Amino acid sequence: MAEKATAPRHIAIIMDGNGRWAKKRMLPRSAGHKAGLDTFVDISDACNDMGIEYLTVYAFSTENWNRSPEEVSALMELMSRGIVKYEPEMVKRNVKLKLLGDLDRFEPVYREALLGVEERLSVNTGMTLCICLSYGGRQEIVHAVNKLLKEGKTEITAEDISNSLYSAGVPDPDLVIRTSGECRISNFLLWQSAYAEYYFTDVLWPDFDKKELVKAIESYSKRERRYGR
Ligand code: IPE
Ligand code: IPE
Ligand code: MG
C-alpha cells in the first residue's frame, strides 16, 4: 500500500552554492563559506524547533579535497571553529552530534577538537545532527565492507552493511534537499537514500532560510511514497 508522506523524521541536505553566492557579490569564495556556515546554524536550529529528529548535512566531500589547498585549509578551519563555537548552543538544545566521514584526513588539531565536541554531546537525547565531513558515499560503503571482512564475515547482508556505515543507528533519510540548482547526488548517502524523496531548489545555500525549509517539507508532505508496492 502506498503511504502518504507525513512529516519527515530525517532530513538530509546537500549545502551547495556558497561559491556562486560569493561570486555574485564579488566576494572571495571564503566569504560564501562563512555565510554558508551561518545558514547551517540557522537551519539546524529551525529543524530542532520543528521537532525534526535527525538532520544530516553534507559539509565537505571526499572529492572536495581536490580543491585548491587555500580553499581546503580555509574550509577546515572555518568548519572546525564553527562546530566548536556552536557547541554551547547544541548543549542548550540537547543536540547529539554524529560526524560521518574519514576524519583521519583532517589535521590532528581539528580532528581532536571535533571528536571532543562529538564525545561531549553524546549524552544528549534531542535531535541528532549528523555532519558529513571528508565524506563520500562510495567510500563509506567500502569502509563498511572492509570492517565486516575484518570481523571475519564471509557473507554479508544488507542489514550488516547498514549497521557498519558511519551512519549506523540513524534511520534512512526521508527527504534529501539540494540547493543551488544542481540536480545530482555528488556521492551523498548513496546507500541510505535508496527510497528518499528528493527536493531540488535553485536557492543558493547562504540564501536558504526557514521559509525555504518549510517549502521543501510541504512539497515532501504532498508526495506519496510507494516503496515499489
Ligand atoms: C558548497 O558550496 C560548499 C562545499 C562544497 C564545501 P560550493 O563551494 O560547492 O559552492 P559552488 O557550488 O561553487 O557555488
Ligand atoms: C557537494 O557539492 C558537496 C558538498 C555540498 C559538501 P559540490 O559542489 O562539491 O558538488 P559538485 O562538484 O557540484 O558535484
Ligand atoms: Mg558546489
Image (cartoon, helix red, strand yellow):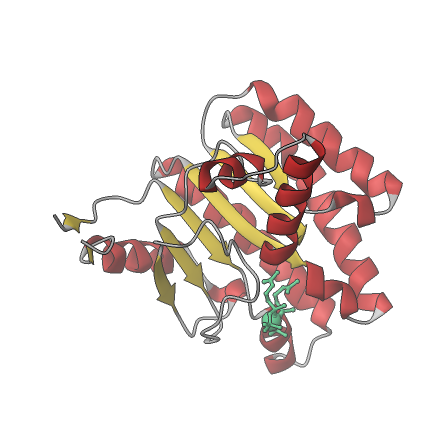
**Which quarter holds ligand 3?**
bottom right
State left or right for residue 57 relative to residue 31. left
Q: What percent of the width, then of the height, locates residue 223? A: 20, 58
State left or right for residue 140 relative to residue 210. right
Q: Is residue 104 above or below residue 62?
A: above
Residue 167 lies in quadrant? top right
Q: Tag count in the figure?
A: 0
Residue lying at 29% horizontally and 60% vertically, measured from the top left:
215
Residue 70 lies in quadrant? bottom right
Residue lying at 61% horizontally and 57% vertically, measured from the top left:
138
Residue 187 visible to the viewer: yes
In this orientation, which residue lies closer to the viewer: 222 or 101?
101
Residue 200 lies in quadrant? bottom left
Q: Is residue 192 above or below residue 202?
A: above
Residue lying at 67% horizontally and 22% vertically, measured from the top left:
120
In this orientation, which residue lies closer to the viewer: 101 or 92?
101
Of all residues, the one furthest to the front in this rendering is: 154
Q: What percent of the width, then of the height, locates residue 145? A: 63, 44
In this orientation, which residue lies closer to the viewer: 25 or 151?
151
Q: What percent of the width, then of the height, locates residue 110? A: 81, 42
Q: Is residue 92 above or below residue 13?
A: above
Q: What percent of the width, then of the height, locates residue 186? A: 56, 67
Residue 85 visible to the viewer: no
Of all residues, the one furthest to the left in this rendering is: 1
